[in-house]
Amino acid sequence: MVALDTLVVAAALTTIRSDLGASAEQLEWTVNAYGLSFAMLLMTAAAIGDRLGRRRMYAAGLALFTAASIACALATTLPLLIAARAVQGVGAAMVMPLAMGLLGAAFPPERRGQAIGVFSGVTGIAVLGGPLIGGAVTEGLSWQWIFWINVPIGVVAIALVLAKIPESTGPARRLDLIGAVLISLAVLGLVWGTVRGESADWTSAEVLTAFAIGVVMLVAFGLWERRTDHAMVPLAFFRNRTFTASNSAGFFLTAALISAVFFLSQYMQAELGSAPFKAGLQLLPWTATLFIVGPIAGRLVDRIGERPLVIIGMALQTIGMLWLSRGADQYYELVAPLMICGCGISLAMPAAQSAAMSSLPREAVGIASGIYSMNRQLGGAAGVAVLGSVFTAAGGYTGNGFERALAGGGVLSLLGALSGFAIAARRRRTGTDDRVDDLVVEGV
């Protein structure tokens, strides 16, 4: 349910824009409000769950997510929908990291890998099936029902969690609330300035103030994390070249991926005249490729290492995105570049995550995974914000906005490929990698 809502609104964006009179800028916030609150509170929520009880906080997160889904469905204006999506993101931040902790506590080590594999497979299907399911529900019922369907699922899930899952706690970690506030304000300021730059003017007081606040808060965050003894993001990790490079690659990978889905789902409807459900189906050559290539990529990581897979994968996505940016008169012209993009992301995604976590000592794997997940969510929000500005500057829906935005996705993918060159060559396999195997499947 939580994973599904990452991209379930994609195929409904055109309908929402028509029903609520939304601008391209406002549509961006329906995606970014969810992603930003999710990213900013992910590590804090995990720490609170370890301290107060994972089952209790998991159920609370489900309840909050369900209540926010009702608010989304009842929203009659874009500001109300955006606010409700932000609250949804808070609920998602409480659910996703704690789910992994509950799985780890519920299964013995010899069955834990299988359990995480099933969980990750279901999560992957939900994320990739978001545009298709959202399109079917939007066309068959209405866009509000993409949120209403969360309500019965949430109620049943809460009851099952409280009845069937034993309570568990983790190591008591001190909360870095100051760090969480500083990074949240920093990212909000930078994203706000980027989203508003084209419509409000890049030299306006609003935009310059937003950027100034973002930069000041980012510097303050860095200074605070260096001096505190319970840092949310240990900056020493980034002295490791491979950890930094793989996080950079993951950031650009997700930035290109989420923004491409955001624009392609609208392109299918606005330019090719597809209905919402058909638009979701038309993305299948891209999304379905992950189920074929993803498992192969996971095995290749062990054989040839992460660096070549990240570089080749992101290079393929660059080619696919630039090909898509040429536009098409008929849908069949998009099938080949969509498949190339799918192959590229299938190779790069598990490799980048594997590199990030296997580059650090065994005891740091948990925090490394949290940082990578947070960084990935931030990449999605940044990609939509930056390419949204490109879209607006190129004329939006009436100009060459879609083509320029997709070309921008190609540039982001190229930056991800260049980041891959800084990942260290594969070393001899160590015991740390055995633990990493359980976590890498989340990337697939």
Image (spheres, grey):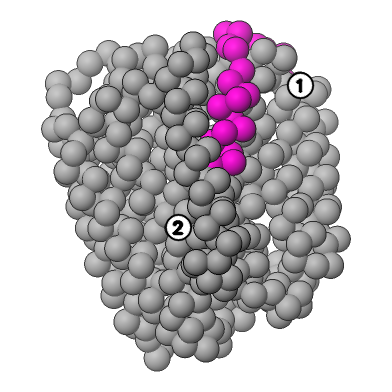
Read off the residue under disc 2. Answer: 383
**Which segment is the magenta one?**
165-187
Q: Callout 1, which amino acid?
A: Arg
Q: Residue 395 location in percent, x, y?
A: 48, 84
Q: Is residue 223 visible?
A: yes
Q: Residue 272 location in percent, x, y?
A: 50, 87
Q: Is residue 170 in the magenta section?
A: yes
Image side of residue 49 versus residue 250, left or right: right
Rounded to the nearest angstrom, the CA distance separating label 1 from label 2 is 34 Å
Q: Residue at x 46, y 16 (%)?
A: 227
Which residue occupies the foreground of this view, 73 or 245? 245
- Image mark for residue 421: none
Q: Is residue 16 in the magenta section?
A: no
Image side of residue 425 versus residue 233, left or right: left
Which residue occupies the foreground of this view, 179 or 322? 179
Which residue occupies the foreground of this view, 229 or 141? 229
Is residue 85 positioned above or below 297 on the image? below
> Quarter of the image holding residue 179?
top right
Q: Residue at x 45, y 49 (%)?
A: 379
Q: Residue furthest top?
A: 172
Quadrant location of the C terminus in the rendered image: top left
Q: Residue 26 location in percent, x, y?
A: 65, 67
Q: Residue at x 58, y 21 (%)?
A: 176
Is residue 337 positioned above or below 177 on the image? below
First in sequence: mark 1 vs mark 2: 1
Q: Residue at x 73, y 78 (%)?
A: 21
Read off the residue under disc 1. Answer: 56
